């Protein structure tokens, strides 16, 4: 999608977005990230009258406008950091520069929980309803802290439960890795292979943020692997 900055007025950032069908959208984004206005005459004005495809485009246009607004006003909190490509790229750099020995020590619990979440969950659970979190804090290009693994799962009554404590890091200094349990082979080599899984996961999140706003990712992010678990247009995210 192509965008054009239209200016700022009364706390609203004007962004023109041209979508994949060459339809023009005028979007006004608040400094808090809220969509204050979205004008377009090519698709139905009411959401309930749009097709799934039309709603996908409308949603992706709004995300693209938010991203453009964040680039125009980088000091404003328009996007949540984990939904900002630049933030993820900074975290990716810190991860790739992290000492491999420290990585193997600090991320082993992430591997163990992904490989066998039953080690951590002392209750009945559905393996398909488990999410495993690993969060690290970085400043500049350096990881300064790595939190213990955190899990969320659902019981038979579809009630959520957690194991561990989600860290209280500043959002603009943290990277959240969240992956469902993995079916790893018995001969899987943690020390030699797991670093690639985590790096690829962060790269795949960047990939998915481009898809989230209706764009093809740059070639270096066109990879396989688990990224965001919920984006516009994936059949899971809001469409």
Image (cartoon, rainbow, N blue to C red):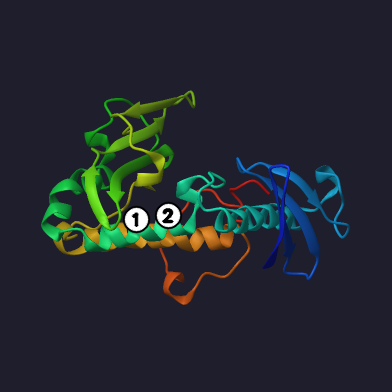
Q: Residue at x 49, y 53 (%)?
A: 84
Can you tell which quarter of the image residue 234 is in? Answer: bottom right
Per the image, label 1 sits on a secondary structure element best described as helix
Query: Which residue is drawn at the image coordinates 80% and 64% (left, top)?
Result: 24
Residue 101, position as x, y percentages in the image: 11, 57
Q: Nearer the viewer, residue 153 or 205?
A: 205
Q: Position of residue 136 (x, y in %)?
A: 29, 45
Taking depth in this image into account, of 224 and 104 the one nearest to the observer is 104
For this view, does 136 lie left or right of residue 7? left
**Residues at discs 1 and 2 in contact (Cβ within 8 Å):** yes
Residue that label 1 marks: 91
Q: Residue at x 71, y 56 (%)?
A: 7
Residue 180 seen in the figure: no
In the rendered image, the vertical position of residue 156 relative to residue 59, given as above or below: above
Tell whether 45 sits left or right of 130: right
Q: Secondary structure at mark 2?
A: helix
Q: Residue at x 35, y 62 (%)?
A: 200
- Residue 185 lies, in percent from the top left, at 24, 58
**Residue 49 in view, yes or no:** yes
Vertical order, 239 against 117 (above or below): below
Q: Is residue 35 above or below residue 187?
A: above
On screen, residue 9 above or below 92: above
Query: Could you tell whether 213 is left or right of 228 in the image?
Result: right
- Placement of the N terminus among the 4 image quadrants: bottom right
Specify few, some or many for label 1: CA neighbours under 10 Å numbering under 14, 14-19, or 20 or more: many
Residue 121 quadrant = top left
Q: Residue lying farthest bottom? A: 219
Which of the 4 quarters of the picture holds residue 86?
bottom left
Spot occupied by residue 202 in the image (x, y as percentages of width and height)? 37, 57
User: Which label belongs to residue 214?
Assistant: none
Residue 87, labelled with which disc?
2
Label 1, label 2: how far apart the Cα atoms are? 6 Å
């Amino acid at each position: 999608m192509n965008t054009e900055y239209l200016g700022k007025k009364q706390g609203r950032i004007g962004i023109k977005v041209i979508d994949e069908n060459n339809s023009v959208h005028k979007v006004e984004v608040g400094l808090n990230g809220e969509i204050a206005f979205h004008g377009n005459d090519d698709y139905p004005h009411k959401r309930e009258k749009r097709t799934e495809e039309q709603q996908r485009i409308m949603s992706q246009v709004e995300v693209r406008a938010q991203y453009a607004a964040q680039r125009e006003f980088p000091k404003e909190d328009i996007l949540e950091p984990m939904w900002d490509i630049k933030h993820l790229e900074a975290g990716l750099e810190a991860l790739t520069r992290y000492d491999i020995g420290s990585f193997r020590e600090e991320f082993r619990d992430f591997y163990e929980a992904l490989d066998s979440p039953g080690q951590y969950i002392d209750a009945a659970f559905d393996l398909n309803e488990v999410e495993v979190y690993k969060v690290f804090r970085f400043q500049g290009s350096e990881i300064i802290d790595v939190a213990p693994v955190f899990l969320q799962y659902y019981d038979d009554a579809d009630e959520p439960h957690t194991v561990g404590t989600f860290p209280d890091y500043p959002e603009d200094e943290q990277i959240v890795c969240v992956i469902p349990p993995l079916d790893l082979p018995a001969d899987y080599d943690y020390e030699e292979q797991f670093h690639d899984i985590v790096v690829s996961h962060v790269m795949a999140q960047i990939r998915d943020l481009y898809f989230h706003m209706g764009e093809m990712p740059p070639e270096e992010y066109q990879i396989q692997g688990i990224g965001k678990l919920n984006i516009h247009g994936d059949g899971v995210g809001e469409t």
